[in-house]
């Protein structure tokens, strides 16, 4: 591994992450519009968002396994193309099931490019693995922040049926990616069978990996529930569509700051301590976000998002340190599979919201991160620091 960071490649990989997640961010802030247009129940909203996250993230390990075995850009280019084309088509959906179809195809595209590009980051990061991963992760987090603002403004100005015109942005980025992203480096696992490859990747470190994965699933379940249902909760409190998009964006964009800070710190201190501090502060900041008045909701959203998203790049760096020969697959477990499985719990959140109310369910979810604080104490000391 070259000690010098390849800035050009890291930028190209970050652009893939940003562009794909930019389109993935369209769905959540538009839920109130889809609810009104198609008369959706909270259960249907939860079902649709859960299916999207299953296809976006839970299937990522299978793609990551293939990405570690074969040298191809098919996953990067094909996946990005599906997201860029099919998510905007959701604005034309005349029925609930057509909406599900368009968003599902776009979500599957997201699952295709994530493992491959994430696995490539350490190969071009040099000695700045934590910082490079946090910059890469920032591309996705920033997209989830800018996306809601953009699409809320766009739909409010031009309407849902104009959404296909937004493909032009993504197709332009796709052309740049086609010219700039190198062919992924294969780990040579195509010479082994399925179980032999898994044993080579994770055989001696599966226990700490599973522990970190459980923590990330719980973190995702809480974060995704707030991303899905806070826009509807804010709509019930008479926030406009643009205001909802702005609050959602602030919640996510603040994660770009915390992700960069956490990535920087992970090159210098043990990642487990970042987990303990960030997750301990999730509960109080989410409570403030839930109960904040209209004058303070933007500040509260920033504080909550800062804590919710801080540990994503740290978890990937720690996992790749434990399993350096399965970078794509292990990254897909921490960022994709964990994120998606947590998001798949939104149908349960939606059903409970239909029964007890959104505010009550979100209030209980605020305390769930305290479980992850306890589990984080059992993380291994990996000594990933480059400067100690």
Image (spheres, grey):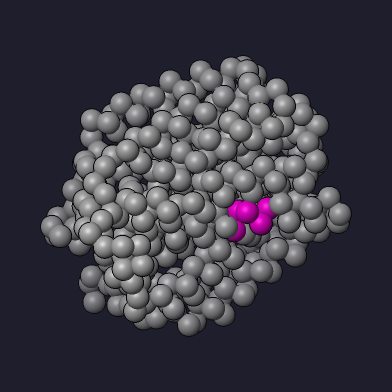
Residue 240 visible in the displayed image: no
> Is 75 situated left or right of 357 in this image?
left
Quadrant position of residue 34: top right
> x, y (%) of residue 262?
40, 62
Q: Quadrant of the C terminus?
A: bottom left
Quadrant position of residue 291: bottom right
> x, y (%) of residue 327?
31, 60
> Is 291 situated left or right of 317 in this image?
right
Looking at the rendering, the stretch of residues picked out in magenta corresponds to 342-346
Residue at 30 percent of width and 26 percent of height: 175
> x, y (%) of residue 133?
33, 55
Q: Residue furthest front?
A: 193
Residue at 49 percent of width and 68 percent of height: 213
- Residue 268, above or below 65: below
By secondary structure, the bulk of the magenta-drawn segment is best described as helix
> x, y (%) of residue 13?
31, 43
> Could you tell me how many numbered marks the image carries?
0
Q: Quadrant of the N terminus?
A: bottom left
Residue 76 visible in the displayed image: yes
* The one of 102 and 35 positioned closer to us in this rendering: 102
Residue at 63 percent of width and 40 percent of height: 28
In the rendered structure, does residue 343 fall within the stretch colored magenta? yes
Residue at 49 percent of width and 51 percent of height: 59
* The one of 319 and 286 positioned closer to us in this rendering: 319
Q: Residue furthest right?
A: 355
Quadrant position of residue 307: bottom right
In the rendered structure, does residue 215 fall within the stretch colored magenta? no
- Residue 67, above or below 209: above
* The one of 388 and 296 positioned closer to us in this rendering: 388
- Residue 298, above or below 1: above
């Amino acid at each position: 591994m070259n000690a010098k960071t390849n800035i050009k490649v890291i930028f190209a990989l970050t652009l893939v992450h940003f562009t794909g997640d930019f389109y993935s961010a369209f769905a959540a802030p538009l839920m109130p519009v889809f609810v009104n247009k198609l008369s959706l129940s909270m259960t249907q909203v939860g079902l649709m968002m859960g299916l999207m996250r299953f296809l976006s993230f839970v299937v990522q390990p299978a793609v990551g396994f293939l990405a570690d075995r074969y040298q191809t850009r098919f996953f990067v280019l094909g996946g990005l193309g599906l997201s860029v084309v099919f998510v905007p088509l959701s604005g034309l959906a005349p029925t609930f099931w057509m909406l599900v179809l368009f968003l599902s195809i776009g979500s599957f595209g997201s699952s295709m490019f994530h493992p491959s590009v994430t696995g490539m980051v350490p190969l071009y990061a040099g000695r700045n693995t934590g910082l490079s991963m946090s910059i890469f992760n920032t591309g996705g987090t920033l997209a989830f922040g800018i996306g809601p603002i953009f699409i809320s403004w766009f739909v409010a100005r031009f309407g849902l049926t104009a959404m296909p015109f937004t493909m032009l942005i993504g197709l332009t980025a796709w052309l740049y990616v086609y010219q700039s992203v190198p062919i992924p480096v294969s780990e040579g696992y195509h010479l082994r069978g399925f179980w032999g490859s898994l044993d080579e990747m994770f055989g001696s470190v599966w226990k700490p990996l599973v522990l970190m994965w459980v923590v990330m699933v719980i973190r995702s379940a809480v974060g995704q529930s707030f991303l899905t249902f806070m826009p509807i909760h804010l709509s019930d409190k008479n926030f406009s569509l643009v205001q909802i998009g702005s609050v959602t964006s602030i919640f996510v964009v603040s994660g770009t700051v915390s992700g960069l800070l956490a990535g920087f710190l992970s090159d210098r201190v043990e990642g487990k301590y970042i987990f303990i501090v960030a997750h301990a502060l999730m509960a109080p900041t989410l409570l403030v976000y839930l109960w904040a008045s209209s004058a303070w909701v933007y500040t509260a959203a920033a504080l909550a998002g800062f804590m919710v998203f801080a540990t994503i790049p740290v978890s990937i760096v720690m996992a790749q340190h434990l399993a350096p020969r399965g970078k794509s697959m292990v990254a897909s477990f921490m960022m994709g599979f964990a994120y998606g499985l947590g998001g798949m719990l939104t149908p349960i959140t939606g059903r409970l919201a239909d029964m007890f109310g959104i505010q009550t369910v979100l209030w209980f979810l605020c305390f769930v991160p305290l479980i992850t604080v306890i589990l984080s104490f059992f993380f291994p000391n990996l000594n990933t620091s480059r400067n100690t």
